[in-house]
Image (cartoon, rainbow, N blue to C red):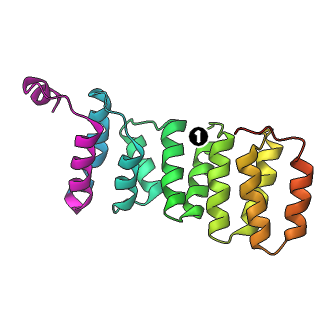
């Protein structure tokens, strides 16, 4: 593939990769080629973008099986890749799948940052999984992550959605002096 591309003086891009992935993900036979294409994309120095993950996740791959299949062929997703996957899942209102990806990050001995936790927190709250949201918020605090204004906003929103306005106000008062404004 690389030899053909270089002989044509064509520089592949994320757009051309996405076009190929879209075609492959529409066909069962094509799904088998996706991990190989992803490996070749690294050789050609094509970065996966969020739109690439949207295509892959919307295909017939389950998110966790997709991540596992690309790992088997030597593609090791990094934190940026995982964050893109989480973002896509949350946008698609699949917060529990995003939580599974977060757990997979931790199982790979990587340390998710506050942005990943905030996205997953938002996702589980959108799905109405408030107990999981409470556990997730407690976990990020125990791990020593410092919630930012966005994290507190998401968490307070979740408390208010549970009609726990007093809890939301309590968190707001507690974090009032701890959060730096990023605006």
Whether residue 33 is visible, yes or no, is no
Is 30 left, or right, of 149 in this rendering? left
Is residue 166 or residue 27 the one in the foreground? 166
Crowd around label 1: few <14 · some 14–19 · many ≥20 (10 Å): few
Range of residues picked out in magenta: 1-29
The chief SS type of the magenta part is helix
Residue drawn at (47%, 38%) of the image? 77
Is residue 36 or residue 53 the one in the foreground? 53
Q: Kindly indicate the quadrant of the structure image that contains residue 15.
A: top left
x and y percentages locating residue 120 in the rendered image: 63, 55
x and y percentages locating residue 136 in the rendered image: 74, 55
Please say whether residue 92 is one of the residues in the magenta stretch: no
Whether residue 127 is visible, yes or no, is yes
x and y percentages locating residue 116 in the rendered image: 62, 46
Query: Dot 1 corresponds to which residue?
Result: 108
Please say whether residue 18 is one of the residues in the magenta stretch: yes
Q: Secondary structure at mark 1?
A: loop
Residue drawn at (31%, 36%) of the image? 39
Is residue 67 or residue 89 the one in the foreground? 89
Quadrant where the N terminus lies? top left
Q: Is residue 167 above or below residue 115?
A: below
Quadrant where the C terminus lies? top right
Is 65 left, or right, of 103 in this rendering? left
Please identify the residue farthest to the bottom as the structure is shown.
163
């Amino acid at each position: 593939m690389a030899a053909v591309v270089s002989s044509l003086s064509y520089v592949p891009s994320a757009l051309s990769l996405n076009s190929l992935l879209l075609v492959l993900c529409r066909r069962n036979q094509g799904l088998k080629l996706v991990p190989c294409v992803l490996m070749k994309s690294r050789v050609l120095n094509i970065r996966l973008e969020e739109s690439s993950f949207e295509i892959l996740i919307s295909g017939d791959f389950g998110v966790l099986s997709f991540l596992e299949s690309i790992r088997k062929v030597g593609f090791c997703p990094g934190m940026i890749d995982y964050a893109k996957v989480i973002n896509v899942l949350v946008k698609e209102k699949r917060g529990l799948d995003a939580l599974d990806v977060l757990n997979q990050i931790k199982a790979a001995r990587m340390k998710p940052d506050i942005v990943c936790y905030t996205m997953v927190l938002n996702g589980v709250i959108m799905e109405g999984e408030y107990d999981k949201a409470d556990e997730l918020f407690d976990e990020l605090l125990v791990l020593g992550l410092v919630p930012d204004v966005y994290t507190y906003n998401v968490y307070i929103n979740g408390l208010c959605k549970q009609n726990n306005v007093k809890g939301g106000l309590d968190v707001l008062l507690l974090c009032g002096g701890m959060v730096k404004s990023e605006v």
